[in-house]
Image (cartoon, helix red, strand yellow):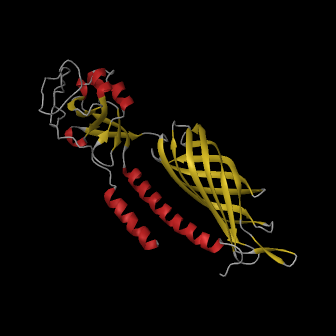
């Protein structure tokens, strides 16, 4: 399993390097269209692409390139631009008794190894991407891919609200003009998110005794806004019971996160979820002279507090203090890890 994880990581890293092209988000493109043409390049929000957009090369500009506000008309065969009166861009181009604890723990460890490999790969790829603000020449070529499948390229200074509304994707390349990276953007949660956390949690045996053991949580979800996200969550926790055999607790829940608090690079909020909990225990409890299995499945309700440290536009160090109600009991956990957005 470890060898498989290494191979998987290598293949993902080999194919997941960030490209030397950048997207301008639609809301930023619309904002730039309203800025005076000569000032548009001062501070442009750009997001580095993982896979480069398939657009042709444009004629590069230099610091000495003259700023022209009205682009010349130039039409390429088979290339369609925004419907703006025909105007196109000016730069076209052990033995267990009554339980399954040991087997379930082995499966959980295998899942965690693969999940950690995926997390490390995602963190490396996202950490290598620049997501922030850059200074461009006002005549820097902007490649526009339209909602209708068309394409055109024009100087940043020639962008107007009609072109911005027509465009589905806007791409710029550092190789096509003067480029100065200014600063990264603050933590942005909106979109897909993946997290993995580890720490300690209290786990209750079928005999009723409560003790601490390793605890892990995996999450995959989506933040609709900067503050609100929905996740599918898997929890794994295990320890030895009084007989020296394996007890493992698994929980599979749907979770809602709310992160409204921010103080500089520190963030805070709450989470809550509901789903199913399963306890597998290779030990037993005794009822008289009878041996009774320690396995049990019940509903589960979870909740707690979350704290994040903003370390990158797409990465956050995250700590969770949680409580879970399952099997008619309460259990707690304290875990810390990384979330990739």
Residue 7 position in % (x across, y down): 38, 68
Camera sees residue 40: no
Q: Quadrant of residue 297?
A: bottom right
Q: Residue at x 65, y 71 (%)?
A: 101
From the viewer's perspective, tell me whether residue 69 is left or right of residue 127. left
Q: Residue at x 68, y 68 (%)?
A: 280
From the viewer's perspective, tell me whether residue 144 is left or right of residue 109. left
| 248 vs 62: above or below | below
Q: Nearer the viewer, residue 293 or 56?
A: 293
Q: Quadrant of residue 284?
A: bottom right
Q: Nearer the viewer, residue 276 or 63?
A: 276
Camera sees residue 279: yes
| 298 vs 51: above or below | below
Residue 13 position in % (x across, y down): 35, 60
| 224 vs 74: above or below | below
Q: Residue at x 66, y 46 (%)?
A: 305
Residue 137 position in % (x across, y down): 24, 32
Name the outermost residue toward the right.
Answer: 288
Residue 70 position in % (x across, y down): 18, 20
Name the outermost residue toward the front.
Answer: 290
Q: Nearer the viewer, residue 288 or 119?
A: 288
Name the outermost residue toward the bottom.
Answer: 95
From the viewer's perspective, tell me whether residue 69 is left or right of residue 96. left
Q: Quadrant of residue 38?
A: top left
From the viewer's perspective, tell me whether residue 256 is left or right of residue 147. right
Number of disc labels: 0
Q: Residue at x 47, y 57 (%)?
A: 119
């Amino acid at each position: 399993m470890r060898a498989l994880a290494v191979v998987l990581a290598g293949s993902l890293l080999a194919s997941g390097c960030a490209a030397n092209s950048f997207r301008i988000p639609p809301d930023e493109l619309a904002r730039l269209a309203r800025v005076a043409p000569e000032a548009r390049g001062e501070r442009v929000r750009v997001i580095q692409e993982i896979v480069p957009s398939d657009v042709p090369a444009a004629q590069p500009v230099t610091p000495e390139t003259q700023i022209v506000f009205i682009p010349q008309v130039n039409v390429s065969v088979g290339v369609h631009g925004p419907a703006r009166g025909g105007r196109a861009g000016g730069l076209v181009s052990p033995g267990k008794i009554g339980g399954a604890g040991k087997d379930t723990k082995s499966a959980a460890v295998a899942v965690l190894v693969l999940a950690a490999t995926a997390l490390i790969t995602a963190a490396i790829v996202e950490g290598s991407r620049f997501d922030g603000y850059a200074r461009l020449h006002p005549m820097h070529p902007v490649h526009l891919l339209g909602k209708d499948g068309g394409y055109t390229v024009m100087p940043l200074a020639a962008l107007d609200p009609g072109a911005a509304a027509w465009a589905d994707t806007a791409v710029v390349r550092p190789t096509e003009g003067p480029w100065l990276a200014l600063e990264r953007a603050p933590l942005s949660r909106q979109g897909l998110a993946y997290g993995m956390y580890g720490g300690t949690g209290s786990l209750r045996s079928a005999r009723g005794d409560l003790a601490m053991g390793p605890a892990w949580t995996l999450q995959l979800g989506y933040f609709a806004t900067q503050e609100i996200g929905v996740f599918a969550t898997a929890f794994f926790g295990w320890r030895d019971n009084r007989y020296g055999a394996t007890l493992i607790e698994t929980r599979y829940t749907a979770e809602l996160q709310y992160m409204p608090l921010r103080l500089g690079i520190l963030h805070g909020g709450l989470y809550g979820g509901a789903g199913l909990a399963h306890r597998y225990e290779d030990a037993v409890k005794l009822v008289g002279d009878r041996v009774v299995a320690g396995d049990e499945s019940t509903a589960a309700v979870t909740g707690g507090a979350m704290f994040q440290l903003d370390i990158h536009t797409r990465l956050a160090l995250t700590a969770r203090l949680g409580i879970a109600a399952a099997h008619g009991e309460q259990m707690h956990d304290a875990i810390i890890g990384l979330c990739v957005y």
